[in-house]
Image (cartoon, rainbow, N blue to C red):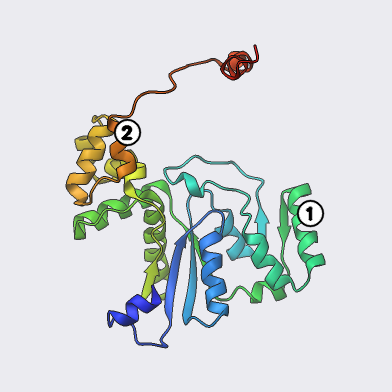
Amino acid sequence: AYASLVRMGKLKDGKRMNVVVPTGNFGNILAAYYAKNMGLPIGELICASNDNKVLYDFFRTGNYDRNREFLLTTSPSMDILISSNLERLIYKIAGSEEKNKAFMESLSDNGAYEITDEMKAELKDFYGNYATEDEAAAAIRKLYEDTGYVIDTHTAVAAAVYDKYKAETKDLATTVIASTASPYKFARSVLHAIDAERFDTLTDMEQIDALCEIAKVPVPDAIEEIRTAPVLHDTVVEVDEMDGIVKKILGVW
């Protein structure tokens, strides 16, 4: 992304850019952190959470606490309360394997840990915030109405958080928002955000066609194949019958 911006003349080589990543498991933003440590001119690392805002709370307080209600959102890949890749960052700023292990044992045993003030100072390049379901939907709708560009529900979290970051810091530096999923994967939620009255009554495949029409992006082959793919599994089973059905499918009963 950095090289592309330089090549396009939108960023001077050597000048810093910010990065916004929608994340629950802290993977892609950790990659950006590693890239920064390797010398890539990255300024602020903006960590965007959805309503499961355990990372937002961590960056604001230094306390990681998974003892909270787990919420199901329209950005399900971010519905995470134990952010496994964060352990790698903690290892980096803790300074030793033993300290890192103690934090992770506290998370396992008590559901929480709190880093030291010295470790908090090591997080100065990170900014954390979160977007509610309504804020993410509004970001999808506004971007589409302003530009005709359609984003998925996870990218919408990042877009909404970036707006909060700009309002809070007044930092208008060149910024890359990591778009981590296709809107086709979350067509119903995306179209609901754009115009619920127009799209909510459509069937799943009708929504795919509608999304293709407004986004002007071809339907991915993996989705097109579903139209004519044979139904291989149509068994519907109650929970208490699952054991017997599995054995029947495996031919062991």
Where 188 sits versus 253, above or below? below
Foreground residue, 57 or 47?
47
What kind of residue is marked 1? Glu
Residue nearer the viewer, 178 or 74? 178
Q: Residue at horizontal 67%, vertical 46%?
A: 67
Instruction: Report crowding for label 2: few under 14, some 14 to 19, many 20 or more residues within 10 A (C-alpha).
Output: few
Q: Residue at x 61, y 73 (%)?
A: 123
- Tell me where residue 219 sits by quadrant: top left
Q: Kindly state the secondary structure of the residue where label 1 is placed.
A: helix
Residues under numbered marks 1 and 2 in contact, where contact means CB atoms less than 8 Å apart: no
Pick whichever, 196 or 191, lies toward us. Answer: 191
Q: Which residue is mark 2?
A: 226
- Vertical placement of residue 239 versus 148, above or below: above
Query: Which element carries disc 2, helix, strand or loop?
Result: helix
123 to the left or right of 210 = right
Label disc, if present, on residue 105 of the rendered structure: 1
Rendering coords of residue 15 (x, y %): 41, 86
Could you say where residue 72 lies in the image, as x and y percent from the top left? 49, 39
Name the residue type under label 2: Ile
Q: Residues within 10 Å of mark 1 (few under 14, many from 20)?
A: some
CA distance separating discs 1 and 2:
45 Å
